[in-house]
Amino acid sequence: MEVILLKGTIAERLKKEAEKLDMNLEEFLLEFFTQNLDPKDRAKEYITVAKEMLVQAKEEISEDDYRQAAEKIWGAAALTVKAYAFWKEGVRLASHRDLWEYSRVLANDLGDWVLHVWNEASGIHTCFYEGWCTREHLEATLKSVEQLVKTVEGKIV
């Protein structure tokens, strides 16, 4: 995995811009670099990044960095819902509200289990802010989100 280190003014500016849009840095950069792609190609890029985030989450769990792992797990779930929206309707989901509403569309297409996974991922997102989750919480949610990513990838690729 390629690593780019940014420091100083550029790093702070990127972080502030991402926060304004309620995104993590990876998602912000993904939005920027895929904005001119066809929606179906954009969906594939989102799934690729979601899978990478799950790999990062596993590494962070093994290093006991539970907050960062929680953020990556939730991010992967969010990117997967966004990918499906791009693939199915060519629409960009821009808010947490949009994600919650579109998770129902995804559940209608794939089954009610999607709502359970979405709820798990959203619950684990709280861990990023509060730090209350355990390794067991993270590993269980990671497994569920991996299934969501795999299922959506199978439909859109």
Image (tube, rainbow, N blue to C red):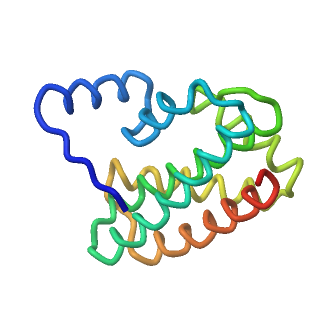
128 to the left or right of 35: left
Q: What is the quadrant of the C terminus in the image?
A: bottom right
As drawn, 85 above or below 5: above
Measured from the top left, where is residue 71 in percent x and y? 41, 52
Q: What is the quadrant of the N terminus in the image?
A: bottom left
As drawn, 28 above or below 143: above
| Residue at position x 29%, y 28% in the image | 14
| Residue at position x 43%, y 29% in the image | 22
57 to the left or right of 100: left
Task: Name the quadrant containing residue 66.
Answer: bottom left
Measured from the top left, where is residue 131 in percent x and y? 31, 58
| Residue at position x 48%, y 32% in the image | 33
62 to the left or right of 37: left
Measured from the top left, where is residue 5 in percent x and y? 20, 46
Residue that lies at the very extreme toward the left in this rendered image? 8
Q: What count of labels does the image hold?
A: 0
As drawn, 70 above or below 91: below
Task: Name the quadrant containing residue 86.
Answer: top right
Task: Name the quadrant containing residue 38.
Answer: top right
3 or 139: nearer the viewer: 3
12 to the left or right of 150: left
